[in-house]
Image: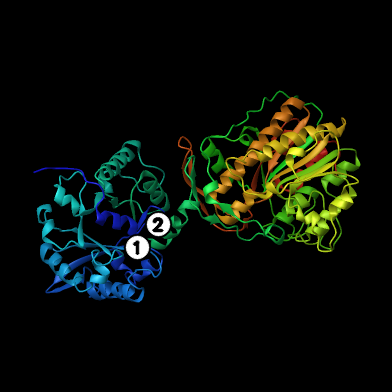
């Protein structure tokens, strides 16, 4: 008899469509053992359910000691859902579900005939010929031999065995391949599979897919590591008893995994949660724009400076919201980071004065002033007294000072380096501080904060006697002229086309600051603002892109330091955002999977990297206020 390999049948297509959560089927193993069978998993968004069944007399029973029958436990409630939801399992959606019945009887054919008769009572819920959204029914266990498949109703499909030899007609009735995981691997879900065992799993998946069938692994480890790895390897169904945790893990899979690819991630917008009043207009991250098709360049510093060289310039770079996990995710996807080539490393405690978990105002102000600041306040004490920032102190001594943010220039972190306010949302009061003229250069977004103020004034009118005013980064003047550049493109999400924007601004502004310093040195704070936004949105692709944008700017700072020989570069973060946990990844394949634990900031210490003369003074574990004091000490200006 002719043996062939078939493409997907209608049953298999329904199966895949039925329970797909970002291309993975989540299956409620032993669903019948739950306190509330079916509904407990159904309400978690799970769409594949399994029950062991036996025939007692003429009634199909759940194969346990509960005394429940199959019809009242599954058939009737499922049928009611279809009736109440207008022929859909979930109202207003195209989702479908799958029921897997494991026949435990020695004579499975009698049970199967009884099941066939029961299903015929509910054609609207269980007959795909009458309702394309009907339940896909698959049977396993003591099922008939393949030559008898055709004797049963077309609404029933069978679980196939890997490597079995089926005819063309028999293959039409196979809805899925069920593979005993323990026959291939002894892995318990901790660490990783042995290479030869993982190869066997991959081969089993490939064999099933070659035949046009989805595959599930029976008896596989049931934890996050195993779910993620089996999904990564291509298993179509993840079997679990912990439907809540598994469902939550895969619910955001499309937003919490990333790899180098030319494909887009979809047409949805990842909205940013918990932005403050100043940044609330940010529209979110378009998924279709958050991709990288190839690695971005990484700079390896020369280490040609003398440790005894004087420190003339300081470049402080702050990746807002960038914890170690955010940086390492970008490193894994890209295959390297320039900041990871800086050999002096520390961990910085981010707590604010009044809270264990800081906001950007508390953290940014603590870094900028060297004094613990409370959340919400911009370089200001709790009793309303301005605290001098490092730019104010240094500018008084003839040092050229600049502030750049790849975001709203009135947001908390950049604001702390030039302004003062009792509330971080007082953006008009904060930007008015610029009239004191102590900055040489300011660059960021939100033009209307300057030009369209509530009192009808235009702040630029007050600033243009001190500064060149421009609204385009291309027009930044590289001479020593004092300048404010507010370009609203800097507030938009990074894309593969614009990922180098901050790096270009950094290179140009450093030349400008060098010219402006007239040999007296300069201080520059450069912020990668939207790593934080990505954490609030719990959207890994944007986190990787924004971190790479920041790292390209780090590369420009390192290049300048190598050329100059008297420049100290410090790279750190004000805090971590999102509670990112790296689940797994593959540096060779440029892929990473993470899980966010929150939409808010966390108190986790953040990394600090230093390079250049004086870098050795920045190692260790210390409070964020220490950055200010150590910079001034390196410059010969102790402030303790």
23 vs 565: above or below = below
Q: Which color scheme did the rendering employ for the protein?
A: rainbow
Point out residue 145 in the picture as x, y percentages from the top left corner: 11, 54
Q: Which residue is mark 1?
A: 47
Q: Is residue 447 left or right of residue 121?
A: right
Point out residue 527 in the picture as x, y percentages from the top left corner: 71, 45
Which of 529 and 270 lies nearest the eye of the viewer? 270
Point out residue 416 in the picture as x, y percentages from the top left corner: 78, 52
Q: Is residue 15 left or right of residue 625?
A: left
Residue 640 visible within the image:
no
Q: Please, which residue is most extreme toward the left here?
A: 1
Which of 234 and 104 lies nearest the eye of the viewer? 234
272 vs 35: above or below = above
Which disc is residue 429 wearing?
none
Figure quadrant of residue 398: top right
Residue 58 visible within the image:
yes
> Residue at point 18% right, 55% down?
173
Which of 23 and 196 lies nearest the eye of the viewer? 23
Of the two numbered discs 2 and 1 on the same chain, state the one appearing first in sequence.
Answer: 2
481 vs 57: above or below = above
Point out residue 25 in the picture as x, y percentages from the top left corner: 35, 55
Residue contact between numbered discs 2 and 1, judged by CB atoms under 8 Å:
yes
Q: Which residue is mark 2?
A: 21
């Amino acid at each position: 008899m002719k043996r062939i390999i078939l493409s997907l049948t209608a049953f298999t297509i329904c199966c895949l469509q039925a329970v797909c959560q970002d291309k993975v089927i989540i299956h409620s193993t032993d669903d019948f053992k739950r306190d509330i069978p079916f509904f407990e998993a159904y309400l978690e968004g799970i769409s594949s359910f399994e029950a062991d069944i036996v025939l007692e007399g003429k009634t199909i029973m759940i194969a346990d000691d509960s005394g429940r029958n199959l019809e009242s436990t599954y058939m009737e409630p499922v049928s009611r859902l279809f009736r109440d939801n207008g022929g859909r399992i979930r109202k207003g959606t195209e989702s479908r579900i799958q029921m897997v019945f494991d026949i435990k009887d020695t004579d499975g054919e009698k049970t199967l005939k009884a099941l066939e008769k029961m299903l015929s009572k509910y054609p609207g819920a269980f007959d795909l010929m009458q309702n394309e959204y009907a339940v896909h029914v698959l049977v396993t266990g003591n099922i008939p031999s393949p030559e008898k498949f055709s004797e049963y109703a077309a609404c029933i499909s069978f679980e196939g065995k890997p490597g079995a030899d089926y005819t063309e007609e028999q293959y039409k009735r196979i809805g899925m391949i069920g593979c005993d995981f323990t026959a291939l691997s002894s892995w318990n879900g901790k660490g990783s599979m042995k290479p030869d065992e993982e190869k066997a799993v991959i081969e089993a998946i490939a064999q099933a897919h070659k035949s046009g069938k989805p595959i599930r692994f029976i008896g596989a480890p049931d934890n996050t590591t195993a779910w993620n790895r089996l999904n990564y390897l291509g298993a179509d169904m993840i079997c679990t008893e912990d439907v809540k945790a598994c469902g939550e893990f895969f619910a955001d899979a499309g937003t919490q995994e990333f790899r180098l690819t030319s494909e887009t991630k979809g047409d949805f917008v990842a909205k940013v949660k918990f932005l403050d009043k100043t940044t609330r207009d940010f529209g979110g991250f378009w998924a279709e724009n958050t991709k990288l098709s190839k690695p971005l360049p990484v700079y390896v510093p020369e280490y040609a400076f003398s440790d005894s060289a004087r420190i003339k310039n300081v470049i402080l770079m702050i990746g807002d919201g960038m914890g170690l996990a955010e940086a390492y995710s970008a490193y894994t996807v890209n295959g390297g980071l320039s900041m990871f080539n800086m050999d002096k490393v520390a961990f910085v405690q981010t707590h604010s004065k009044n809270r264990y978990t800081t906001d950007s105002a508390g953290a940014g102000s603590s870094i900028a002033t060297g004094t613990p600041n409370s959340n919400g306040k911009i370089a200001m004490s709790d009793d309303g007294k301005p605290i001098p920032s490092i730019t104010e102190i240094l500018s008084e001594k003839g040092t050229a000072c600049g502030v750049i943010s790849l975001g709203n220039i009135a947001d908390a972190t950049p604001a702390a380096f030039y302004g003062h306010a009792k509330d971080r949302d007082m953006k008009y009061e904060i930007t008015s501080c610029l009239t004191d003229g102590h900055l040489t250069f300011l660059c960021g977004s939100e033009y209307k904060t300057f030009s369209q103020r509530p009192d009808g004034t235009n702040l630029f009118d007050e600033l243009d006697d001190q500064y060149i005013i421009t609204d385009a980064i291309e027009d930044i003047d590289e001479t020593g002229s004092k300048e404010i550049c507010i370009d609203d493109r800097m507030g938009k999400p990074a894309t593969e086309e614009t990922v180098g924007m901050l790096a270009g601004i950094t290179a140009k502004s450093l030349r400008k600051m060098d010219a402006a310093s007239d040999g007296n040195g300069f201080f520059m704070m450069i912020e990668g603002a939207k790593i934080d936004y990505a954490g609030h949105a719990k959207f890994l692709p944007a986190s990787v892109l924004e971190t790479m944008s920041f790292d390209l700017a780090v590369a420009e700072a390192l290049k300048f330091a190598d050329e100059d020989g008297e420049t100290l570069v410090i790279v750190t973060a004000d805090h971590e955002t999102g509670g990112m946990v790296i689940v797994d990844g593959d540096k060779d394949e440029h892929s990473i999977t993470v899980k966010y634990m929150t939409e808010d900031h966390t108190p986790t210490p953040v990394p600090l990297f230093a390079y250049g003369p004086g870098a050795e003074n920045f190692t260790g574990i210390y409070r964020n206020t220490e950055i200010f004091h150590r910079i001034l000490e390196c410059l010969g200006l102790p402030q303790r």
